[in-house]
Amino acid sequence: MQRTLAIVRLTWKAAFRFRLFWVLAGLLMLSVVALPLLIKDDGTARGFTQILLTYTLTVITALLGFSTLWLACGTLAREIEDCQMQMVVVKPVARWQVWLGKWLGLLALNATLLTLAGASVFVLLQVRAARLPADQQAILRNEVLVARAALREPLPDLDGMTEQVLKDRLKDNPVPPAEVPVVREQLRAQLAARLQVVPPNHLRRWEIDLGLRRALLRGQPLFIRTRFHVAETNLSGTYLGLWQVGVPEKTRVWREALSQAADTFHEFKIEPDLFDDTGRLTIEFINRNPMPVLFPLEDGLEVLYRDGGFGLNYVRGLATILAWMGLLAALGLAAASLLSFPVAAFVSASLLIVFLSSGTLSAVVQDGSLSAPDHETGEVRKTWIDYGLIGFYRVLLFLVNAVQAFSPVDSLSTGRSITWGQLAQAWGTCVLLMGGILGSVGAFIFSRRELAAAQGTT
Amino acid sequence: MTRRSSTPYKLLLAGLVAVLLVGVSLLQGQLNGQRAELGLTRITPLENAPPVLAFTTVALGSFRGLIANALWIRANELQLEGKYFEIVQLADWITKLQPTFDQVWKYQAWNMAYNISVKFSDPADRWRWVRRGIELIRDEGLRYNPNKTLLYHELAWHFQHKMGQNMDDAHLHYKQQWALEMEAALGSSRTNLAELVSATSPGLRARAEHLRTKYKLDPALMKEVDDRYGPLEWRLPEAHAIYWAVAGLKLTSADRQNKNDLRTLRRVVYQCMQQSVLHGRLLSLQPLRLEADLAKVDAANAAYEQMIANEPDIPDSFRVAHRNFLLQVVYLLNVNGQRTDADRWWSALREKYPQFVPANLSAHDYTLQRLTGGELNSLGHDRVRTIISGLIANSYASLAVDDDTRAASLEFWARSVYSSYSTNIARGQQRIALPPFPEMKEEVLQRFLAPESGVDPRVVDRLRTKLGRPAPAANAPPSP
């Protein structure tokens, strides 16, 4: 361990010697201070806080990400090329320990810089929030500077229900086997529509089980987050719905007539204690429009409740970013274990760009071809390249999605809770699994590499 | 030390740099002139841009397009996800990357005012986005594109349609907020624009400057517009729609190429004049109460006639609009007790569009038809009774707010419907007869005064005072 720590110390010393630490700290501080002066918000305290959190954390992540990659490639590849590594590996320290020491050094460096920048953002937010009028502060504390978790109705087993109905139908009206898949698909669509569509002047009820949380949620306001679609639009662009939360004569009841736009998320506050003694919250919506409205099963309605304070959620968010940095450090070191500094930097930066281009990857995988589909017919013409590359892209997309699934910036700016479980999952996936694989490969290559053969020309 | 690194050599190079820079700066103006003359560039030079923007647009070169594309994609994705807090910033960057592309300004402003605003339930939130849309064109779009007619029309359209009409659930809130802002900005000058133009006192000068800098309103043009189409109610959006349409018209030459631009701007003027007649009188700000402004009928009519005269190619569509406007005027004048004027406009309508007005139909009968929603003989007993009760209730409501003329007029029309029905339809048939008119009046009054009517108690008290009805005794037994 001592040997590994010695390498950690050396990595730190190098970071200070090359003034990298101070430059990065300066850039991070500058971004935290300058961004609030430069960005344009929507004019609300909530909007300002959200954009500030999003932009500062994104800039911090981007700066640290690129510098981590650069440093990881530089600290190993340059030392090999400059023959400095030869002086280290002749000491009684294993090559894997050198590799691990470098990775830990980079992680510690990132942790320090992230703490510094993160703390500055936090203080900035708190100071600005404290200057706001009381009503704005309340909005911030309830909707942004908070950790809110969501509860939904359990998703129905559509496939199971479809099979059951199909079985009953086939018993009475048999169809040729070739037509069964079509019938199944139609039945599934019918069942999904029945669960999602609210015809004019009809009612849709959701029952959300708060479970044991009910004891903690007494006296707490809850928020409903909802989204619906309409088949035909009207002139005003908004649709009237009568909302009722609670059951008359059983619980307190909250009612409101809301005229809301389709295809977007709406969030509204409801009074506390509208659930019954068993913790069941009943929500009803009456469609008062001449057209049907559709609440998607996945995200049509959810109830948001306070799960904790912003501070701890923020720390978990930063810790998730640190997990990303751990993965990037492992990627940079793995590349530098095999390649020269410029090539390693190029390869890892390219991979980072691929990581940021998941939208394109996803579109390619969805279309099944690198070439765009025909705009007239929608037909996709596959070439031999597609057969080779799509599989590779699919794996790449899987990995990218696995990492991006833990995006803390979005959760923090919308006041959504990042749980300890999610944090553990992020570290497990990014650091232990992916970082571990990269680390093993990198350390193995580094152990086998003939260092004296990789001298630079200078 | 080599010869090349010696101090005189460095000084020589520095001098050469200075000479070349001066030479380039002298030539640049001439080169730009020749580029424009020879048509070597299709990019309009950016005017009035701050140094940062001028630098960005030049330094990024063709990469501006790529960055703008990425920003458009992000803005679109965020909007689909319902995250609007970044939209203002993204719109700012997108428009700054394409500052002379007027469609970009138009789209971004429209998106904020029309698409994003309605995503919010709270009228205050909606107003913020509508105002953002207006500000984007007025404060920035027109700054970089002072000669683009499209932007003037779009700005006028926001005032005319988004704020002035009632397509949005929150339109009353928009009107109220704008009226409050304008009242603060114009103060007493809203009815005396001449004093703003001359600005003889420091207070007036400050007010005129505030209008110029914050609202980009030129007092001289305001006065010109007011003299021509007014007096306008500058606290309402229609006056501003007309102002921006006129500002655009002044920039647009009357050649064939600009015919469509001219047409759309002129259309804003006459449509807004019509809107001003319908709800151009501001009775109170809090709560917001608007009323028809019949004093503007002549000016609105003149605007229609001017439009028809300006459009000899397609006069029919404007004539239909004019005819409908005159019909509306007759109805409004009659309902508001100005029966002589209504008859005058009815005659004008008959003279102008004789094939459209049946010879045996009078202004009185036409108004009666509009009030009842059709021929009396096609309406049932219950519907006629409801219409009469409604007219009486509106008459009492007008009386309670001291609008005695309108109250008397509404009672007149209630009596007209009553007598027409009794004479022509019921004709003494007890089966479908209406109760006596005084009885109906009393019944409506009792409903109006009852605590459960939902009418503001202060309004009820004023009506009681006006009619000399005593207030109910405390703890009085409920009426049977």
Image (cartoon, helix red, strand yellow):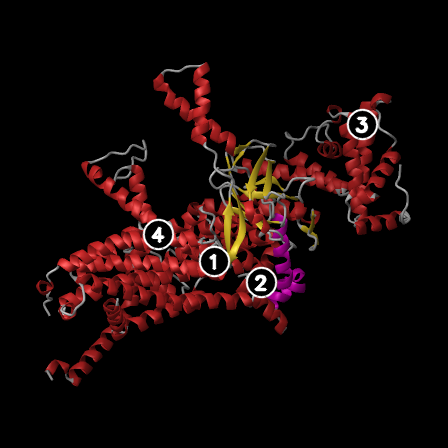
Q: Is residue A165 above or below residue B407?
A: above
Q: Which mark is residue B421?
A: 3
Between B453 and B24, the residue placed more toward the observer is B453
Where is residue B413? Give x, y as percent. Answer: 79, 36
Q: Quadrant of residue A380?
A: top left
Q: CA distance from mark 2 to mark 3?
A: 54 Å
Question: Mark 4 highlights which residue?
Answer: B70
Quadrant of the image for the C terminus of chain A? bottom left
- Tag 4 or tag 3, which sits nearer the N-term? 4
Q: Specify the amino acid type for callout 4.
A: Ala
Q: Which type of secondary structure does the marked residue at label 1 adopt?
A: helix
Boundaries of the magenta span: B171-198
Q: Are marks 2 and 4 in contact (CB under 8 Å)?
A: no
Question: Mark 1 highlights which residue?
Answer: A50
Q: Which mark is residue B219?
A: 2
Q: Specify the amino acid type for callout 3.
A: Tyr
Is residue B167 in view from this perspective? no
Badge nearest the viewer, 4 or 1: 1
Q: Which type of secondary structure does the marked residue at label 3 adopt?
A: helix
